[in-house]
Amino acid sequence: MDLRKRRSMQLLWKALFDLMTEKKILFSKLTVDQICEKAMVHRSTFYKHFDDKFKLLEYGLNEIMEGYWEIPLDKRILQPFYWSDEFFEDSETHKLVSAQQGDELFFDCMTTYSMRLLKKDSLKFIQHSKTIDIPHDLLAEFHVATMVALSEWWRKNPNLVSLEQLDEYFHTLVNGNIFDVEEKKNEIL
C-alpha cells in the first residue's frame, strides 16, 4: 500500500478513535467533517479511502483487533468468552467499547463486524472437526448467533455470571441436549 494512503488512513482512524474515546462523542453522532477536522485531512481525501464513517470504523477495528486473531483458533472457538476477555482487558478495543456504552448504532456495527469474522472462524474450525450432517455454513451461523446472543445478554446483565459460566452456557446451548424429547413426551402423556 502506498505510504501516503496508509498515513491518511491511519490519521483518519486515529481521529475517529480519539473522538470516540477521549471526547466521548458517540459514533452515531459523529460526522465525517468532525473526523476530517480532527485528522487535519481534507474531506475529499476521506472519500478517496472510505465510503463512509462505517467503513472507517471497520478499518480501525481490523487494526485494533489484529492481536485477537493470533490467539489459537481452538481457544477462540471453545472458550470464546474467556479468551475474548483476556484479549480485551486493558486493550484499545475495551477503551472504545467502554466509551461507546449506550450507542446502539455502534454496538450494531460491532455485532455485524464480529459476526462476519466469527463465522469465518467457526467455518474453519468446523471443517477440521468431525463430519456432521448439517451444512457447515448453517452450523457456523448457529454457533455465531449463540455467541452473539450470549454476549448481548451478558452486556445487558453485567456481573450476573462469570465468564467461565458464560462459556459453560455456550457449550450447553451449542453441544448439550437441552431438549430431552423422551422426558418431555412422558411428561405430556
Image (tube, grey):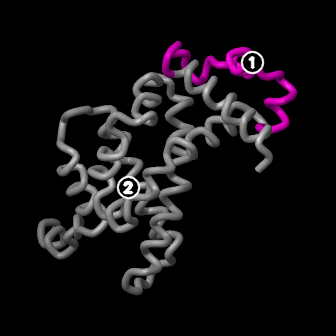
Q: Are circles 2 and 1 on residues that touch, CB within 8 Å?
A: no
In the image, 103: left or right of 5?
A: left
The quadrant where residue 79 appears: bottom left
Please name which of the two marks, 2 or 1, marks the residue nearer to the observer: 1
Query: The magenta stretch spans which residues?
Result: 21-50
- Tell me the SS state at disc 1: loop
> Would you say the magenta stretch is mainly helix, strand or loop?
helix
In the image, 148: left or right of 43?
A: left
**Residue for badge 2:** 146
Q: Is residue 39 magenta?
A: yes
Q: Residue at x 43, y 51 (%)?
A: 68
The quadrant where residue 77 appears: bottom left
Q: Nearer the viewer, residue 65 or 119?
A: 65
Q: Residues within 10 Å of mark 2 (few under 14, many from 20)?
A: some
Which percent across, then down, holds residue 106?
A: 54, 31
**Residue for badge 1:** 40
Which residue is outermost to the right?
A: 44
- Tell me the SS state at disc 2: helix
Q: Residue at x 49, y 70 (%)?
A: 123
